[in-house]
Image (cartoon, helix red, strand yellow):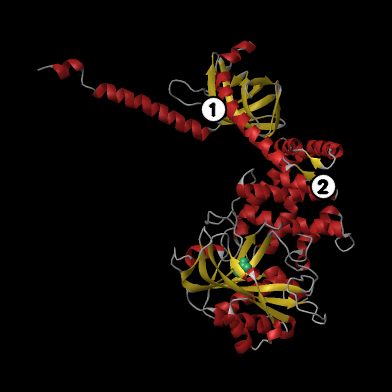
Amino acid sequence: MGLSGAEIRSRFLDFFRQRGHKVLPSASLVPSDPTVLLTIAGMLPFKPIFLGQEIAPYPRVTTAQKCVRTNDIENVGKTARHHTFFEMLGNFSFGDYFKVEAISWGWELVTEVFQLPPDRLVVSVFYEDEEAWQIWHDRIGIPAARIQRMGEDNFWASGATGPCGPCSEIYYDFAPDRSGEINLEDDSRFLEVYNLVFMELNRDSEGKLTPLAKQNIDTGMGLERMAQVLQGVPNNYETDLVFPIIQTIEVITGASYHKSNEKIKTNLKVMADHMRAVVHMIGDGITASNVGRGYILRRLLRRVIRYGRLLGVNTPFTTTIADRVIALAVDAYPELQNQQEVIKQELQREEERFCQTLERGEKLLVEVLNRSKKQISGNDAFTLYDTYGFPLELTEEIAAEQGLTIDREGFDRAMTEQQNRSKEAHTEIDLLAGSAWQELSLPSTQFVGYDSLFSVSRVLALGKEGKPVQTVQQNDRVQVVLDQTPFYAESGGQVGDKGEITGAAGKITIDDVQKSGDLFIHFGTVTEGTINEKDVIEAKVLYSDRRRIQAHHSATHLLQAALKKLSIPKSVKQAP
Ligand code: SER
């Protein structure tokens, strides 16, 4: 085996350190740039500098940056080189050196430090970039036949708007003996290992290009790709950066990577890839949810769990893989050390949450697959999403395995209808806080909250969307009546308590409590599992909130008393 991933990383950084670059640690995967959800390239943390909005702390910088891209997630595990999580090695010049140095150093690094034979390399330039062509040809001495002029592919931009510029790439040729024209798009033969972007333009929202104040350099070398080339393995997954994770998955699942068919191999690769992504994402503070980057995390993690189940694992397993991911990455990304427990707790929580609903969901899924001819209806996909926690993309992928598609428009419609329903439900919730509860003839709620912030209680009634129901489940907006409660209900200017109701199979987060006659109505959202009428539950008030509320309440009384003392009686004021 050639150079290890760690050696490639440190040789890259050392090479540029020796050439006046400041080595900076990787930035977080959560970018400060609001136009993207995740850090998708090594240059992203430096975007404000390229745009002239921030002053560069150093004129030359080099980094190994953790990145996550999900734009071509369907290729992950299927091609040799696609990932969601990857490391990008980069050297950056902020208005300092430009094309000559970037190209000369790039070539020196690749051919001398990494010792790739020049006759295995091909370079590309943007077809209008005569200057780059000349540098490669006249200065470096690359034969014209090995310099390819390319179109839009060689114009790099971090997004629809923002800093951009022509780029020049170095490709490794896996099959130099193959005759015929050089076609860099043939990825069975060529692999792009290093991209040099000559960042000198800004694209505005109308697509207009204007020169940036300074000419900059942004480069990116995919660490896993370089490792593939230098370690002589057939794909990025078999490098020392990823394969140990696959080996852990082999132990957990009993599957053997090398003896498996392509489908199982792909599943193992996807699991390893996604686990790298989720570990680093949680490490950078992302938690699973149904929106934004939290949804990306959820989608990746639930895909891993489902693949694990397909390989026959029915007990929680993601934290075991996480240990391996962390051990492999912690030297380069020391922030993982302190986050280890947080990462594992979040994995455990999300895995439990998903497994609870997965079994029921899988039954429905089989039914849906059986009854759907060509397409899964939007409503079915929505039920799987909303009630059973199947990310739409996961249902889509399972459907595709059976040759089915999903009615996406129908799904969007069902989503909008549900959002409208929950808005309407809010109006009904107010109704329920009123006299409607009285019709249920429930015994008065006993308030035990003066002595305690906790009680074991029985659920006497549940309400959802304005109606009494027997059961409530995850994501439902609900009202709960208990036989006894420690929750203070809003009255006398003091707001209701917040806290949690926890049953054997579910949890409700309570965010408001109102009185309806003698009944205390707890308002909340089911955050886990299910809760049923007659369940015995634990009701727990959030202490910190109650303390603050009490303090406010007392302060109000004190203020009132003080004002009374201070106010001048009318008779005095009117006296001559
Ligand atoms: N920004 C360029 C890329 O991502 C080079 O770093 O390829």
Q: Label 2 sits on what residue type?
A: Arg
Q: Residue, x 73% and y 47% (percent of image)?
A: 393
Tell me if residue 307 comes above or below residue 98 in the rendering.
above
Tell me if residue 187 comes above or below residue 349 in the rendering.
below
Residue 131 horizontal/vertical position (percent): 57, 81
Q: Residue, x 80% and y 61% (percent of image)?
A: 247
Q: Quick one: 112 or 416, which is closer to the camera?
A: 416
Residue 365 horizontal/vertical position (percent): 81, 39
Instruction: Tell me the crowding category of disc 2: few under 14, some 14 to 19, or many 20 or more residues within 10 angstroms, Cα based.
Output: some
Q: Label 1 sits on what residue type?
A: Asp
Residue 484 horizontal/vertical position (percent): 60, 19
- Residue 394 visible in the snapshot: yes
Q: Report the label total.
A: 2
Give residue 359's quadrant in the image: top right
Q: Which residue is mark 1?
A: 512
Left or right: 380 in relation to 125: right
Q: Could you give the CA–CA distance between mark 2 and mark 1, rounded to whole angstroms?
A: 39 Å
Q: Which residue is mark 2?
A: 309
Instruction: Tell me the crowding category of disc 1: few under 14, some 14 to 19, or many 20 or more residues within 10 angstroms, Cα based.
Output: some
Q: Helix, strand, or loop for circle 2?
A: helix
Q: Quick one: 145 or 270, which is closer to the camera?
A: 145
Left or right: 230 in relation to 527: right
Dot label at residue 56: none
Labels 2 & 1 near each other (Cβ < 8 A): no
Q: Residue, x 86% and y 60% (percent of image)?
A: 262
Give residue 100's quadrant in the image: bottom right
Q: Helix, strand, or loop for circle 1?
A: strand
